[in-house]
Image (tube, coloured by chain):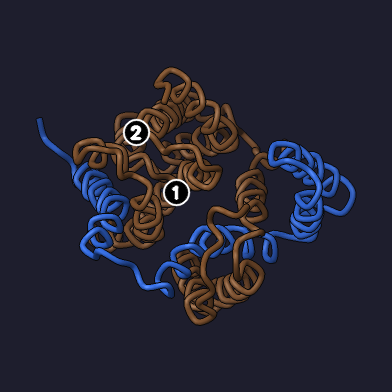
Chain colours: A brown, B blue
Amino acid sequence: MNPRRDMIDGVMAATPGMLAAAPFGLLFGALAVDNGLSVFEVVLMSVAIFGGASQMVGIDLFGDRIAPWLIVLSIFAVNFRHVLYSAVIGRHTGSWTAWQRALGFFFLVDPQFAEAEKRAESGKPLSFIWFASGGLTFYAAWILESWLGAVFGSLVENPADYGIDFLLPVYFLVLVMGFRKRSSWLPVVLVSAVASIGAYVLVGSPWHVSIGALAGVAVAAAIGARPKIMME
Amino acid sequence: MEISTTTWIILAGGLATYLTRIGGHLLLSRFSSIHPRVEAALNAVPAAVLTTLVAPAAVFSGPAEAATIIVAALAALYLPGMAVFVVGWVAILAFRALIG
């Protein structure tokens, strides 16, 4: 075990996801100011919540005079998938202390989760140093981007002109395809896709995430095949 | 210093988010052994969740976006992740220029 090596590896692993999220950090800051938040509130949101989709949903609801508890509940619903991430990653954190877990799990955003799973599957140890250095890099960049976006609200004037508004779905697709050798992958992906599309139409965003994911996970549980975690 | 309602909502939203990130582990660590079906379910979580962030975006954004997802998915069968990401970026620009 080499802490210095782990630190470099951790930052390297977090970099692609960080680059993919960067336009959204800027966009979030710009949109939040546009929706009436102060620069302080924008930065506080990225510091306290650190979850792009839920922050977007939050600023969307602030403008509509919706009850505070409902806004908090919506943020919770968008991020509810992290309960499952946490349960999965928790299995690989045997070498962490309680305080390292309390701190480390704060950084468990989507790309960091995917990279940590890849790391654990490759047989390398999921050390706290590896996880925290990547997570902290991503976190610092996210705060900086939302601050920049808020200050220079016009910096990302029309993200569609550069295609950057569609980079996050492409990035998530890359992650989905990376898991394709897992047992039950195809039925899980097909059911999740159909269920999330159906829920998007019938129930609406953000519930399509929780509903679609639960449907896919239920299929995996029904098939019940032993996971081939170490065989990829 | 007066703390605004918005600030309280943000702090509560942050706490709620942190609970989702620490909660799964705290709940699961109470069990000494994990049932194989639970293990299979947990193993399917990443693909299931990430699919829900892709599928509606692919279907409801427009023809250029749908075509981009198809091209990127095919590219992912042959290319490493970062290359697929670049292919997807080029594809969205090209398809939007061609088919809007």
Which residue, given by chain and number where applicable, does mark 1 sit on?
A56
User: Residue at position x 30%, y 66% from top?
Assistant: B33
- Disc 2 versus disc 1: nearer the observer: 2
Left or right: residue A196 versus residue A83 is right
Would residue A227 be found to the left or right of residue B35 on screen? right
Q: Is residue A36 visible?
A: no
Q: Is residue A61 visible?
A: yes
Foreground residue, A174 or A36?
A174
Residue B36 screen position, x and y as percent? 42, 72
The residue at 43%/37% (across/down) is A125
The quadrant of the rendering that contains the N terminus of chain B is top left
Packing grade of label 1 (10 A; few <14, some 14-19, many >=20) is some
Q: Amino acid at mark 2?
A: Phe
- Crowding at dot 2, Cα within 10 Å, few <14 / some 14-19 / many 20+, comes out as many
The answer for which chain carries disc 1 is A
Residue A171 shown left or right of residue B68 in the figure: left
The mark found on residue A231 in the picture is none
Farthest right residue in view: B98
Query: Helix, strand, or loop for circle 2?
Result: helix
Give percent across and percent down for residue B94.
85, 43
- Label 2 sits on residue: A128
Residue drawn at the location 82% of the way across and 52% of the way down: B100
- Amino acid type, residue under disc 1 in the picture: Met
Above or below residue A219? Residue B31 is: above
Question: Looking at the image, which residue is at 44% across and 23% down?
Answer: A7
Q: CA distance from mark 2 to mark 1?
A: 29 Å
